[in-house]
Amino acid sequence: MAEDHRVSISRTGGVGLIRIERPAQKNAIDASMAAAVTAAVRDLDSDPSCAGIVLAGSGGIFSAGADINERSDTSAEGWTYSDNASAVMLRTVKACDTVVVAAVEGWAVGLALGLVGAATYAVGAARSRYRLPEAGLGFFPLGVAPYLVERMRPAAVVDLALSGGPASLDDALASGLVTHPAPAGEAEDTAVALVEDLARLPAQVLQHARDFLRMCASTKEDDDIVGWCEQRMTAVVLERNSSPARGQQKGTDPR
């Protein structure tokens, strides 16, 4: 399994906990961390004793999104955005057969919203905030958007992306992005309890529920949407990488 000390993996009974541990940078995710999350999800998903997976962040924040001071490595011949570590991470979470719950405290920004949308459920703590800042950086968040439309209306995703402003927990619940509220500081515990409650149901019931969700998603041609977005993100990333070096940006500050 790919390892990175900034991504911790632990167990609480039958619940696997993956925690992003980079609080000094507001849990911004670089390529190594994305690969570590991917490996952890795959490892837990293959473990029959794991009833569910909780994704969380340390230091009172879920994640400020991708580390924008790290450029994508596009040197491989025939590189496309689908090869990007963050794209692989989101697809892996989305395809996971095990229930995945995102536990959001504080801010969830950019790429982090992709994790929230790719998860089976999302628990949002009081005073949590949700933001897509990419338009202000010069591109539409096509790498994240396809993972939001299963629970949000496409027009609502576009509005959130173009406004660049934060959505409150109430906004996120109303849009369907967040499925379960929690008191401040209790998102992780609430997510673990949710997994434990679901684990008490007959396995066939849970499987049929997941099959139903996937059937509904397939009628929206989810894979086609992801592919269309990744194709366009390939051009965006290649163009940005070929531009003159950008000045250091405070990409880890979600405000």
Image (spheres, helix red, strand yellow):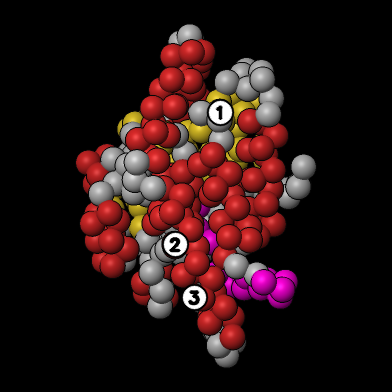
Question: In the image, which residues are magenta?
Answer: 60-78
The percent coordinates of residue 176 (x first, y second) are: 28, 40
Residue at the image point whose x is 62% and y is 73% from the top: 71
Residue 73 in the magenta stretch? The answer is yes
Q: State the separation of the CA atoms marked 3 and 2.
A: 13 Å
Examine the residues drawn in magenta and state their main secondary structure. loop
Write down the residue under mark 2.
228
**155 lies above or below 57:** below
Left or right, residue 95 beside residue 166: right
Rendered view: 144 above or below 250 = above
Query: Which label was assigned to residue 236?
Result: 3
Identified at 57% across, 21% down, the residue is 51
Mark number, residue 98: 1
Q: Residue at x 70, y 34 (%)?
A: 43
* Location of residue 194 by image quarter: top left
CB under 8 Å between discs 1 and 2: no
For discs 1 and 2, the disc positioned in front in the rendered view: 2
Mark 1 → mark 3, Cα distance in angstroms: 32 Å
